[in-house]
Amino acid sequence: ARPLPQVSAMPPKAPQGKAGKNDAASKAQSGKKDGGGGKAKKKKWSKGKQKEKINAAVFFDKNLYEKLKKEVPNYKLVTASIISERMRCNVTMARRAIKDLELKGMIRCISKHASQSLYTRALAAAE
């Protein structure tokens, strides 16, 4: 009499195999669990993007500084983020460079705010 309850446990598995809908539903449920794992993998990809930030220069060497003085005064819009992206340096260096270029008269301030400062080329103002 006891083996019968074990046999009665088997039939719920059989309908899942017969009906494709139940099988798909069980896959969807397991897919959600896998999807959670997939999301975790996507987060790992974002860590890979952070490695690019590590490659940014921390100090100005002669070549980078000359490139900065040559190219930045020709930009129509100058912000710390634009300089850091194009020159591959960190934003702190870009802010220092902006102050330096402004003191030398190569760029001029359009708008200054605590969070963002906008500058443009000084040549446009001279002409």
Image (cartoon, rainbow, N blue to C red):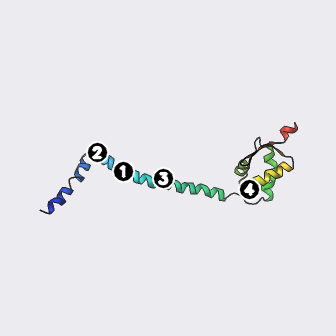
Q: What residue do we see at 22% from left, 51% from top?
A: 14
Q: Give yes or no for contact between labels 1 and 3 (Cβ–Cβ under 8 Å).
A: no
Residue identified by numbered label 1: 29
Label 2 vs label 3, nearer the camera:
3
Residue identified by numbered label 4: 92
The x and y percentages for residue 5 are 17, 59
Q: What residue do we see at 48% from left, 53% from top?
A: 39
Q: Is 19 displayed left or right of 55 in the figure?
A: left
Residue identified by numbered label 2: 20
Q: Amino acid at mark 2?
A: Gly
Instruction: Give whichever of discs 2 and 3 has the lower sequence position.
Output: 2
Instruction: Give whichever of discs 2 and 1 has the lower sequence position.
Output: 2
Label 2 vs label 4, nearer the camera:
4
The x and y percentages for residue 19 are 26, 45
Q: Quadrant of the C terminus?
A: top right
Q: Residue furthest top?
A: 127
Instruction: Give whichever of discs 1 and 3 has the lower sequence position.
Output: 1
Instruction: Give whichever of discs 4 and 1 has the lower sequence position.
Output: 1
Residue identified by numbered label 3: 39
The x and y percentages for residue 60 are 78, 58
Q: Amino acid at mark 4?
A: Thr
Instruction: Give whichever of discs 2 and 4 has the lower sequence position.
Output: 2
